[in-house]
Amino acid sequence: MVNGEETSKVTLDTSLDGDELTMDELAQYFKELKSRYEILLLQNKSLKKKNKVLKNKLDIVFKEKNDLSICFEKIKKDFHDHKLVCKGKSPSIVFDKNKFLGIQKCIIVLDSTLK
């Protein structure tokens, strides 16, 4: 509910037998209906704002995941080159294995968060 407001329920207590309503009862019913409608409009506006904020956060997460994936692929290639260096098949390349493992861990966390 918006700001802790409790939505009022529209109820009809008729004083007449059958389906006939007095003008006062109809007026009260429509007043309650209008009040409920205004509350729902405020809730809708609030939810739209929250939805926009969440979409922006999701865009940030996807961008960060993409950046990490690109970095991960580069470090993965560097790691592969490093393994070749260790076997004596190419020139020496500086590599930080902890950085590689850290980025790999971040990508796994992001993947599991987005699923």
Image (spheres, rainbow, N blue to C red):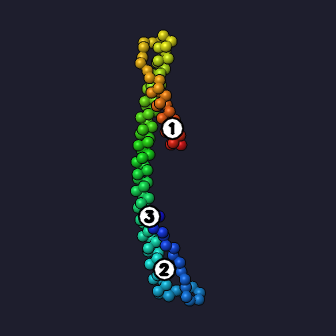
Tell me the number on the disc at residue 29: 2
Residue sitting at x 49%, y 28%: 101
Determine contact: label 2, label 3, CB under 8 Å: no
Q: Secondary structure at mark 3?
A: helix
Q: What's the amino acid at mark 3?
A: Val
Q: Secondary structure at mark 1?
A: helix
Q: Secondary structure at mark 2?
A: helix
Determine contact: label 3, label 1, CB under 8 Å: no
Disc 2 residue crowd, few under 14, some 14–19, many 20+, Cα 10 Å = some
- Above or below: residue 25 compared with residue 107: below
Mark positioned earlier in the residue sequence (2 or 3) = 3
Could you tell me if residue 97 is visible in this image?
A: yes
Disc 3 residue crowd, few under 14, some 14–19, many 20+, Cα 10 Å = some
* CA distance separating discs 3 and 1: 34 Å
Disc 1 residue crowd, few under 14, some 14–19, many 20+, Cα 10 Å = few
Q: What's the amino acid at mark 2?
A: Tyr
Q: What's the amino acid at mark 1?
A: Val
